[in-house]
Every structure is written in structure tokens, then in C-alpha cells.
Image (cartoon, rainbow, N blue to C red):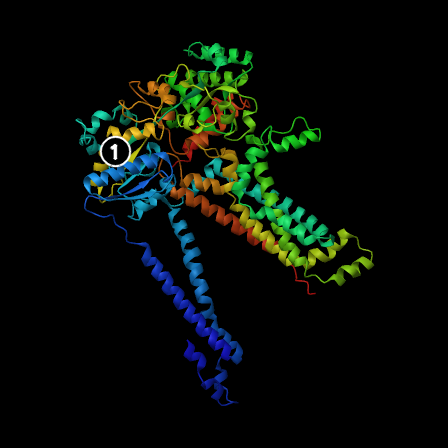
Amino acid sequence: MATTIDDPLRTGAPRGRSAPASRAGVGPLERQRRRMFWPFTAPALTVYAVLFIAPVGYALWTSLYKWDGMGAMDWRGPQNYILLFRDPRFRTSLVNTLELMVIGGTITFVLSFALTLVLREMRARLFARSVLFFPSLVNGMVFGIAAGFLFSPTGPVNQALKLFGVTTPPKWLSTDNLLPMVLGTLVWTATGYYTSIIMAAVDQIPDYLYEAAELDGAGPFQRFRHITLPCAWDVIAVCAVLWTVSSVKIFELILLYGGSTNAYPPVSSWNTAVYVYTEAFPQGTVPRLGTATAAAMASLVMVTLITVVLRRLLRREPVEY
Amino acid sequence: MGRTTMSARRVVGAATAAALALGASACGGSGDGAKASGGFTYWSMWRADEPQAKVLKAAIDDFTAATGAKVNITWAGRDIAKKIGPAIAANQAPDLWDESDDKVYGTTAAADQALDLSPVLQLQVPGEDFPVSQVLPAKYFDMLPKDPSGSNHYVIPYEIVTNAMFYNAADPAIAAAMPSPPTDWAGLLKVCDALKAAGKACIASEGEDPWSNALYFDYLLNGAGVNVSQLAADKSGATWDAPAVLTAAQQVEQLVKGGHLIEGYDATKYPTQETNWASGKAAFYMDGNYVTAEVAKQVPAGWKMASMLPPTAKTPDANLIGFASPKRAKNAAAAQKFIAFFLQKKHLAGISTTALNLTPRADIPAPAELADVQKALDAPAVRLGFDGVSGSWLPKVLNENYLDLWHGKTTAAQFVAKCKADQVSYWQTQG
């Protein structure tokens, strides 16, 4: 490779002749770039193919078989997928996944926007940002474990509520409140994370835009709607995709809030990730890797579709400033 | 341009280096192989700091000293059940490993990947005058499901676990309410009423946990002659219509509706209620016998651990923790020699004296806290919890419906109808 690049002919070529420009009017810089394309991208592509495409391909292949991971593989064709969609438990998992994604996402982003609105204008905002960011540093396990203590009927949360005159607080840890609790924890950790990213973009917006708007009589909300939102749109769009992808992978929170030492969480609180886990590691029987991977493929397709649609919906002309 | 050339070289160089590194590490992964010369590899479900590990380690050291065979031990912890399948598939599995019978069956025996260990039964227990078959009661093997090759000797137990209602026999309130253990369900309810009148909750329950709470249902079904595994296997769900099943559900409902479960049980997480029970706020707690070790440091002085099965239960349930070998084990004979070696009274007794658990040998006395449990296990037959029902039936059919009943959200009749419906759709999707 290197020798081609060092080829001295390039500079020594006679000018004015049409032969060197045989590649249809491509300039030397462009040609150089094209030559460099593969050497530069090949390592990344290789890593991507080995670590991502190959496992997904393998999973797709496995999803067409009945397999316990050890013995022979029985060909099933699309049967695993048909059974999967006939399983009401899987359909509930899909709905739960979408619920966490849409409801959790809406609350997270509404809160993030509200915080952005406040943080831009407030003093000590760097400190406030660190405080907001802190929950996302803490491992989800800690919340699951702490919740048992914090939200128990005589725990600190209810004691605090009592001070405010709430005498019959909800049964926080009951099975009915499982998904709302997971959602709450999720929103709490994610809000700080996305606020930090969005604020980083907002910091780049020149102050004079805000000053001009203020002079024109725009209130804080209008400044947010007409300056912050359009100028930070690219970053917000990326955040939305990041949220979508990460919400599908929520797993340990459900397991920790809903699972006990002896059993999986109640089936009505499963999302697709938990469903995949229970199929891959069932109790007292061999793994059902075919259905597990089929469920994983189904959720991969779902998140891909949603991401593509989301990207389309969020596409805007970038604002130059 | 000069810079581009340089960086291009670097990139190519880096890519080559990366490729070499990847290649090298791929090579580094393979090749293990246990040593020959009477030695073998052993992956343990215990972590090195657990008492069972200490008992096993002492025996292994003794084994090496006596036979010269080297044992290559990995204290893998409970993750072992998830690692063993892939290890077998990659031909990297150990010669010996241990887990509970359901894990051994589920991860290996059901797929016909577990070695039949019946030859161990013929081996002489070193230093004792009888073969292994005489020190291990046959009932522990009889209860196990058979693997595809027809063997139920894929696990050789060294520890037994059973489930029962535990209580403090020295508690005056309990002694007053229950002069002698009840013999029928109405008797238990009467005990609960007496406790309630004395201001003590009858049953402490981790309301989130379907398994321990459903053990009441499991034992009630057993008392009524219903086999849970057969109930679960009925694709039409018709078995749920048996009057005995509804009666068992109604009996559970009586505990719930009677207010016999400790207050707040449906709004806490483990181990809140276990702690409440250990501090005397409720009389009974249903769990595996390991609970006595769990609360040993919490219970007040003077606590006298006792246990009983729910009245009407006919057969105590049991789980085995024991040794297993993959079919592809390279040093199976050496590993089997060690199994027989560990079953010697002097080594196995450590499971009782050091690890404070039950052993399968009748001539090793149980720890004092487990005396009642041991007595229950002396029954002529034992059974697996939930009659060994496996797979996703528990999470997909029973568990959540049972929790709804246990939390008082559904009636016994609704519970039975819901289980029946869910079981039908469960079997339609099992392929």
C-alpha cells in the first residue's frame, strides 16, 4: 500500500496530457482519498463484522433451529417465530418494551427539556449538572437493592410522606407497581444523563441569539422553543436514538425489582430482554436457544425499524450559527 | 501529502498488529485438558469462602495425600450452571462438578450430556465396610426424572435440602397456640386464630416470591394426591378441573382471607419478612432448610428452631446437591473414586458440623436446628418440590397467578380458571 502512495510518478507526470485524468476528472486529492478509503475503513469494518455482524448472523441461523446449546440442532424453519408470536407472554413483553420506550422516553425528554430551560439560566449550573448526572453513574443493581429498604412500608420514603400528612401511602413494592417503579428509576437515572448531553450542545449556542430574542420580548419558553430547540436539534435527535436503543436493553432493573431469590419477575412485567433470558436459562430444563434467539431477533428488528422511523421523523435542516 | 503517507503506513501497521493480536488471542483460548495420572478437574458451585468449600477442600487435600492424585479445583460459584453447557459444547468441561439435582438435570442430563454415575454405587467407601449404595438411600434417586438414556444416577448427593414451615418452639405464644402440631388444615387455621388473638401474625411471607409461598399449595396438592408435574403436563388443562385442586386453592385462600399472613407482606422485598419472623413478629416461615443458617445470627437467645410440614402433606420434598460428571469427561474414573472418598463418614460429616446442613447419610446426625427436618426426611419416600416440574411452566403459568391469589386479588376459583387458560396457551407455544 505504502509504495503506491509514495509513487513519484504522480508529481513527475507530464502536465496537459489527458491520460492521467483517465478517471473521469477526479482530482489528485480525491484520488488520494479514494485510495485511502479501504486501508482506513477495513480495520473498523473487520472489527464490526467479527464482533457484530457475525454474532447477529449466528443468532439468526440459530433462531431457525431447536437447540440446547450442546447437542444436535433440529431444523425448525420459521416455526420458532410463529410460536413466539402466538405466545401471549411474548406479546406482553413486546408491549412492555414499547411502553418503557415511549412512556419512559417522553417523561425523560420532557424533564430534560425543562431542566435545560432552567439550567441555562441558573447560577452554579455546573454543580447542578453534576448532581443531575450522578444517578447515571450508579449501577442499576444498587437501586434495586436499596429500593427494598427505601420503599418498605416503614421505610424512609413513607416516613417522609407521613411528615407531609400522607397516612396511606401506596404499596410501592407490590407486584402491581413493578413497572412504574422500574420506569421511575429509569427516568431518574436517564434524565441527568440526557440533560448533560443536551446542555453540552446548548452551551455552544451563542449568547447573542438569546440576548436578541430577549430584546425582542421573548420569554424563557419562547427562547427555548425558537432558539434552544432548533439549535440543539441534531444532538436531541441523537439522544432520542440512544434512548430508543438503550430502552430495549433494560434488563437488570426488572430482574432486581421483580425477581426474588427463587424466581423470575412476574411474567406480566417481562420485556423482551427478560423473555430472551428466561428462554435461554430456564429452570430445571435445557436452554431453548432457538426461541431465545428468535425473540432476540424480533426485538432487534423492532428496534431497527423504530430507529429508522425516528431518524426520518427527526430529520431537519441543520441550523448554522 | 507526506503526513498522509506516514499515517497510512501507521494505519496499515496498526491493522496488521491488531490482526496478529486477534489471531494470537484466538489461539490462546483453546487447549486445556485435564491431567492424567489419577488426577482430575473439578468445578465447584461453592465459592472458596463458603463452609461447604472448606469441607470439600479438606477432603480433596486428604484424597491427594492418600492417593497422590492431583485435583485441579475451580471454585466457580453458582454461575457454574450457566457455564457448564457452553463448556461441554466447547469440549472444555471439567471431569467433576456439583450443583443441585434440578440444575444438573436441566443443564446436562436432560440433553443426555451427563454421565451415568451408577458405577459409583458399587465402589467401596474407603475405610468403611460397605459400598456407596448402602450409605445413600435409594429414595433420593427414585424421585429424580430419568435422562434420555434412562438413568437417574446422574447426580450423587452429598447434601440434602428440604422445605418446611420453621418456627421457634421456645416462643410461649406459639407453645400456647399449638400444644402439638396440627394434623389437618382446620387445625392449622385454629392455631393461626389463636396466634391472632394473642397478637402475633401466623405466617411471615415474602409476598414477592412465588416459589416459597406456592410451597403451601404444592404441599396441599401432595396431601390431596395431586402430582404437580402431571398437573402441569396436561395440555388440555382439564386436570385443573379436579375438585382436589380447587380445594387446595381454597385452603390457601383461607390463609389470605383469614388475615393470617403478616401485615405488609405484599409490599416488601426479601429479606424484610424473614427478618420480621426471626425477630418473633410472626410464628411460621416457609422456606428451604438453609434458612436456619441464614437467621442463625439474628434470632434472639433462647430461640429453639423447630419445623413441620403443612398438615395433610404426605411426602416431604427434597432437593439434592451433589456431584455430576459430563459424558465427555476425560478422567471420569478418578473423579468417581473421589466421590466415594468424600462420602466417608469422617468427611461427609463436615457438611453437618461445619456447613450446618443435612447429609444423605442416615448415620450422620443433623445439626440441632434441623433435627425436625431430618426426622421428616426419614420418611420412606421423598419427592421433588412441585414434583420436579420444570421449564417455563412455573414462571409462565403458575407464579403470577399464584401471587394474585396470595395477595388476595383473585379468588380460588378465578385462580384455577386463569391457570387452566394460561396452561392451554402455554402448551400451544411449546412446539
Circle 1 packing at 10 Å, graded few (<14), some (14-19), many (20+), is many
Residue B196 position, x and y percent, is 54, 14
Identify the residue shown where x is 57% and y is 49%.
A243
Identify the residue shown where x is 24% and y is 37%.
B62
Looking at the image, is A48 positioned above or below residue B196?
A: below
Q: Nearer the viewer, residue A83 or A319?
A: A319
Looking at the image, is B8 positioned above or below residue B251?
A: below
The answer to which quarter of the image holds residue B47 is: top left
Identify the residue shown where x is 42% and y is 79%.
A4
User: Label 1 sits on what residue type?
Assistant: Phe
Residue A228 position, x and y percent, is 71, 56
Residue A135 position, x and y percent, is 59, 46
Quarter holding the N terminus of chain A is bottom left
Q: Nearer the viewer, residue A50 or B321?
A: B321
The answer to whether any part of residue A91 appears in the image is no
In the picture of the structure, the residue carrying the numbered disc 1 is: B342
Relative to A43, is A212 on the left or the right?
right
Looking at the image, is B324 positioned above or below residue B365?
A: below
SS state under label 1: helix
Identify the residue shown where x is 55% and y is 24%.
B409
Residue A268 position, x and y percent, is 52, 34
